[in-house]
Image: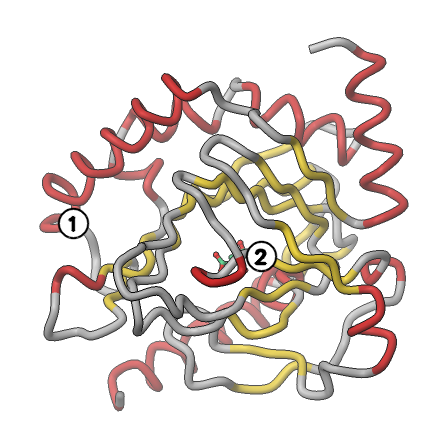
Amino acid sequence: MEQKYLQSLRYSFDKDGYVYIPGFLSPEEVQALNEHVQRFIKERIPVMSTGQYFYEDKNDVTTLKQMQDLEKYDPYFKTLAVDSKFETIAKALLDEDVICKTVEYFNKPPKIGKPTPPHQDGYYFMLDPQQAVTMWLALEKVQEENGCVKYVKGSHLKGMRTHGRTSTLGFSQQIVDFGTAEDIKDEVAFPANPGDLLVHHSLTIHRAGPNTTADRTRKAIGLIYWGVSAKEDKAAKEKYMEQLAKEREKA
Ligand SMILES: O=C(O)CCC(=O)C(=O)O
C-alpha cells in the first residue's frame, strides 16, 4: 500500500477516531472468507473452550452470535491477521509495530439479534497507553435495520467514560451515561457492503442497533491489534476475567 494513502488514513483516524475503507476486500476475497467462517463453525466450535463462542439463544445453534480467538484454532485466520494487509493498516494507524490479539466473529441473528451497547474497547483492554485498534469487516450487507455500527466522532480524544454492567452476552460493559446531546450530535452510522472495513481507536465510543429484520443475518469479522508500546494491567485484567467467569456460571 502506498505511503501517501496510509498517511491520509492516519490523518483521518487521529482526527475522527475511526476510518472507513470501502471495498477493502474484493468480492472473491469476501466469498473465500465467508466459506472459511462456515468451515470454522463446523470444524472448530466442537473443540473450542466454553466462553469463546456464544449463541443468542443457547438452545438454538442457528443463533450463533459471537466467536473469539479464531486465529488460535485455525491457521487460515492467523494468516488473515498476521503479516497481512489488515496488519499494515493497524501499523500505519498506530504508527508503531503491532501485535494481533484476537480475530473474532460477530453476528446478529434475525429478529433476536440484540443491540451492541455503547462502549469503548479500551475499557476491556485495560492498556496504558491506549494504543490499540479494532477492525470490523462486513461479511454481508449491513444497514440500519440489521444493526450497523455507529461511531461517536472525535470521542477518542475525550478520555474513558464510566462503564457499568449490561446483560448483553459478549458485551458485558456499557457507558452508563451514554446519550448526551454531544454523543447524539457526533454519532455517525456506517452502513456497509460486504468487504468494507471499519477501524476504530480503543477509546472511540461505538454501538450498533438490533437486527430487526425477519430473515437477514448481520455477519462481520473483528480483528484487534495492540501497539507494542501498550502495556496491560495484568492484575486488573485477571480480576475482571474471574468476575466475568463467575457471572457466566450463574447465568
Ligand atoms: O459487531 C458489533 O455489533 C460491534 C462490534 C464491536 O463493538 C467491536 O468490534 O468492538
- Name, please, the residue furthest toward the top: 2
| Amino acid type, residue under disc 2 in the picture | Val
Identify the image quadrant of residue 5. Answer: top right
* Residue 187 screen position, x and y as percent: 76, 64
Q: Residue at x 63, y 70 (%)?
A: 119
Q: Residue at x 69, y 11 (%)?
A: 1
Q: Is residue 107 above or below residue 237?
A: above
Question: The C terminus lies in which quarter of the figure?
Answer: bottom left
Instruction: State the residue lying farthest toward the bottom.
Output: 250
Nearest the viewer among 150 and 145 is 145
- Residue 151 is labelled as none
Q: Horizontally, is 53 left or right of 124 in the view?
A: left
Residue 45 — which label? 1
Q: Indicate yes or no: mark 2 CB to ligand 1 under 8 Å.
A: yes
Which residue is rendered at x = 29% and y = 62% of the image?
109
Dot 2, how many residues are within 10 Å of its Cα: few (below 14), some (14-19), or many (20+)? many
Q: Is 206 located above or below residue 32 in the figure?
A: below
* Type of colouring: secondary structure
Q: CA distance from mark 2 to mark 1?
A: 26 Å
Classify mark 1 as within 8 Å of ligand 1 or not, answering yes or no.
Answer: no
- Label 2 or label 1, whichever comes before in sequence order: 1
Which residue does the numbered mark 2 point to in the structure image?
149
Question: Which amino acid is tagged 1?
Answer: Ile
**Front-most of 31 and 206?**
31
Displayed quadrant of residue 194: top left
**x, y percentage for residue 243?**
43, 82
Is residue 159 shown left or right of residue 79?
A: right
